[in-house]
Image: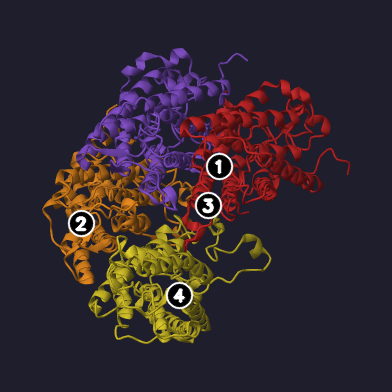
Chain colours: A purple, B red, C orange, D yellow
Amino acid sequence: MAVPYLPEYEQEETVMPPATPHHLREHGLEPANSPFAGRIGGNQDFVLDRSDPKNLAELDRVPDAAPCMNAQEIFDLRGFLSPDLWKFAMLEFVASMLNTFISAWVTTHPYAPMTASTAASGVYGTVTFFSPTFGGLTNLLLTPLLIYTFSPSSGGHINPLITLATFFARIISFPRAVLYILGQTLGGALAGFALHAAFGDRNITVGGCYIDTTQVPVTSGLVIEFFACLIIVWLCFGVALDPRQAKVFGPAVGPWLVGVVVGVITWGTSFTRVGYIGASVNPARCFGAYVASEFPGYHWIHWVGPLAASVAHGFVYFVDPLWKDPRAKS
Amino acid sequence: MAVPYLPEYEQEETVMPPATPHHLREHGLEPANSPFAGRIGGNQDFVLDRSDPKNLAELDRVPDAAPCMNAQEIFDLRGFLSPDLWKFAMLEFVASMLNTFISAWVTTHPYAPMTASTAASGVYGTVTFFSPTFGGLTNLLLTPLLIYTFSPSSGGHINPLITLATFFARIISFPRAVLYILGQTLGGALAGFALHAAFGDRNITVGGCYIDTTQVPVTSGLVIEFFACLIIVWLCFGVALDPRQAKVFGPAVGPWLVGVVVGVITWGTSFTRVGYIGASVNPARCFGAYVASEFPGYHWIHWVGPLAASVAHGFVYFVDPLWKDPRAKS
Amino acid sequence: MAVPYLPEYEQEETVMPPATPHHLREHGLEPANSPFAGRIGGNQDFVLDRSDPKNLAELDRVPDAAPCMNAQEIFDLRGFLSPDLWKFAMLEFVASMLNTFISAWVTTHPYAPMTASTAASGVYGTVTFFSPTFGGLTNLLLTPLLIYTFSPSSGGHINPLITLATFFARIISFPRAVLYILGQTLGGALAGFALHAAFGDRNITVGGCYIDTTQVPVTSGLVIEFFACLIIVWLCFGVALDPRQAKVFGPAVGPWLVGVVVGVITWGTSFTRVGYIGASVNPARCFGAYVASEFPGYHWIHWVGPLAASVAHGFVYFVDPLWKDPRAKS
Amino acid sequence: MAVPYLPEYEQEETVMPPATPHHLREHGLEPANSPFAGRIGGNQDFVLDRSDPKNLAELDRVPDAAPCMNAQEIFDLRGFLSPDLWKFAMLEFVASMLNTFISAWVTTHPYAPMTASTAASGVYGTVTFFSPTFGGLTNLLLTPLLIYTFSPSSGGHINPLITLATFFARIISFPRAVLYILGQTLGGALAGFALHAAFGDRNITVGGCYIDTTQVPVTSGLVIEFFACLIIVWLCFGVALDPRQAKVFGPAVGPWLVGVVVGVITWGTSFTRVGYIGASVNPARCFGAYVASEFPGYHWIHWVGPLAASVAHGFVYFVDPLWKDPRAKS
């Protein structure tokens, strides 16, 4: 019967690897799949069973191949020696570089002072509105494709905000979080050098990375950054990491919903207040944008906002977990 | 039969929990699912069987885990002692806070007197049209994602209008209704404080929360508010809570239809009459907006409108119920 | 958004040819299908099993009918004598000609000096923005249809960038790469002659193929070209060639995602810097455009950019392969 | 959002007629289906098996009920005596009349001299751009519906270009081609009389059917016409007639892809050169438009362009056939 269903959900007796086509597995060719609880769009369906003794060796090597890690597993520093983690961090470096370059380029403008529009169409007829509109659309369309491309290997975080949020939700290990954030930040920086070479002028503003501090106090920027990050983290978990949604849409649709969240938030925060052109929600991207121009004094809010949002989300996640922990005393 | 159906509807022998992947349930990992008749997008498919003795203990604890409650079950005040209800109310607090902040921010403008446009493009070239257009689009896109994220736990009401409507349709209990509305209103208020910190000016109007009472009498506002709420309640029940639709679209599509309803109503009521910028359809959101600016004398219509619409809908729902009550004498 | 279930994935006992309808195969009529690892949208599902002795003769004839070639297979020069490869190269010639003509025509303008817009709407109200917007939309809509049409025979590369990238990813052979690129370039050239006949003026600019070198140094163009190509290569592999995605969307959806990538990148690189009207990401297309106008000194960046991006991608592909090589020593 | 389930792909044991629902066939009710290789969107799935003796009588009567005809079958002039072919030609007459009227009406304008726009928004703010944009969108949306409606009977050609192309691809017989083209042209003519009655002025231009020969030489028009037709023929075969795609999207999606092709090409060729308002790609439609206005000297290009494109496509189709001919010596 021909139903619109996602073939990987033909349930196999064995849990792993669900994405390998049957006829390929039979004859030796096998796509390389990595079990990982923090895979965006995977809805924690690509995980190992912690109670199955067969998986103990793999889980010792990759503690975040299953959710519900304890502190000892999270901070198992042997992860820093794992070639796989370094390889994945390199992929995050590439993904962040590609994402930063194109999403910065499409919203880069020569610096110009911002004033309120006095036309009847208000801000809606100005660059202040058009630029984030098309930047948000670019985010909406490219984010899912970046997630598709990188999620089977590294999980498709691309953005330190996601890595921080999964870390505080205890579904990725400490070494993985550190290596990913390093990779993402370096990728952003390299994209920044390229952006400078491409634009040829340091006197620029990049969408989401500029506050006119004569008109907008930095604390206002921090509040918006915090809320924007909190919404993105919460909705990304809700649509792309919540195992209860694995059957509702699955890995083909989840990344598009993440794209909608990121696109709408980056767009929707950008044109309300004169002098504030939108939330960053990606510290590595603004880091890169500042490499291409210059570092302002308020860059810290692009890191503190995501960090605070991740901690706040992690706290609720701890109180109302998505999984019933099989090792919990109950 | 040709239905676009979703794999979780592969019927299991057991009703609960339908969303748990088979291979996970086998080995102890189990997503935390809460049976609840008032789940938006669930189309009352995530409910317990009231006639199954196995469910009696659970139903005694969570009376609205099944529809067709009697008065004693609805007003079972032990619900106020349930940690789960408090946890869910906290999630509604978070959801309402996130929703209020972003949907208010995107439609916030400095106060300006409203006059009819005299340009050839009429209202369609003015802020009065553009602002609710993009605000409605934001609602349309974000509402489904908020529902996806919160519905598996709290049911994804987010808005006191929905909680009131489900209460008068007798599918949620009194304690749950009270705690949810408290949570949602507090969430709106906190978002209002954040909105004030972010915008830095109290002399603002927020889309859906402003009436120029020199041009529009408050009773006109109440009429529009009542009808807007009634349409939203009726259509939300029709697409996201009617069990007869569970197989027609289910939890992946239903929330998008809710998003369309909310987006179109908030947009479509907003630019017709000079001095009226749209129906609220979410009292907690305007409550928050007024925390960020100041409380006007007409704020009561944002509560009375939803209340009246919920009662009207509940009456028809009582006369023409969606379920055949298994305990009714027939 | 949701994914069509692709009937050919009803697994057959036999691996090849998966796209032949059952009822046709029974009675002698059989569509002509060519196993080929580099088929865009095929996600390497239309490949042969290298370890099955039945396939040895076919693999000797068509070494890139399976992934994981070694150097000897890649450089097996007997491919130059294969009538099939010449036939496929002719199809690539046709595809490139059709693609170049229409995508160049839709973005062709008489030459005009470019200056920064001083209106409130900035670049967003000018030809500089509109032309690539509708050109990008054309790419987004036509690219998938071109891939559908040509992928069952030649793999649907159409563009030397894709052929270079698949070559450096070791999934197509050297003779195929050479013949395809020759065919694509000749197709572009013929489209260029037609473009000249159709437009009747050599003093034109074609979207993606013009740099005002008085305003933009060529190295800036090379940096953008390199990044644009790198994003396209990486995402095309991720959505249309990665075997781990074969079950996630498959050959009906994959080409649309490729269309989105190409459309967004060609659009998104085009209006940021005054004097630069977008990345080429298809050397054969600009080659054709210059046949229709005249060859500028910077045409080399349209070849070096793709080449460098293909090598960079191929390196990471080598370090983190998509397949576990069945012949690798492990 | 959700994916249309395609009922005819429930594989039946019997080849013909694949579209008859089982429960109807059981009790005598059976939809009237005509096997025909040239059915648009059918991907040659609705064909007879030439090697099955049961089908010989039907194939003698309808030689193009299966692909791979030889010359004797193609030119079997007894087809002119077939009531079915006359009936189908009448349906093509109706389809062409409907299509011509609405697609001409939506792009009809009073004649006005064309000059290049000097505004910053260039051609994108003028009728020259808007008219084909909405005309192309109309084609994109209506073409699939016309194909759905007429394809089960006549194959849904509607347009002489498609009939010519299928003839030179040897999947329709000579009598059918002649009768269809006659029907389509008469339908266009009748629509032209209606268009004249509806518009009330002969001094009009219809989108796709006007060249200002003082600005654009007719040979330029012929080159664009040829390329536009070639793209449409090639992509229509690729998405709607190629049997290798039958399982990839099938008769519900194929016609939409045809609509995209026709819409994008008629739109994309229309605003680049001042004085040329787009390719015709349907000689019967321009024939009708000229009945409503007057016949220009260059009308021949609307017939020679499609003819040349069909011959060119037919040649490659012959060299690289889609089917392995069961009667070929191999």
Residue where numbered disc 3 is placed: D3
| Disc 4 secondary structure class | loop
The residue type indicated by label 4 comes to Ile
Instruction: Tell me what residue is drawn at x 47 percent, y 46 percent.
Output: C11
The residue type indicated by label 3 comes to Val
Mark 3–mark 4 distance (CA, rounded to whole Å)? 27 Å
Mark 1–mark 4 distance (CA, rounded to whole Å)? 41 Å
Q: Identify the mark at residue B144; answer none if there is no mark.
A: 1
Q: Judge whether B310 appears above or below D25 on screen.
A: above
Residues at discs 2 and 3 both on one chain:
no
Mark 4–mark 2 distance (CA, rounded to whole Å)? 36 Å
- Check the residue under mark 2 and report the chain it is in: C
- Report the mark closest to the observer, 2 or 3: 2
Residue where numbered disc 4 is placed: D158
Viewer-proximal residue, C127 or A179? C127
Mark 3–mark 1 distance (CA, rounded to whole Å)? 19 Å
- Check the residue under mark 3 and report the chain it is in: D
Residue at the far front: name it. Answer: B214
- Report the mark closest to the observer, 4 or 2: 2
The residue type indicated by label 1 comes to Pro
Residues at discs 3 and 4 both on one chain:
yes
The residue type indicated by label 2 comes to Cys
Q: Judge whether D191 appears above or below C179 on screen.
A: below
Residue B146 placement (x, y as % from top left): 55, 37
Q: Identify the mark at residue C286; answer none if there is no mark.
A: 2
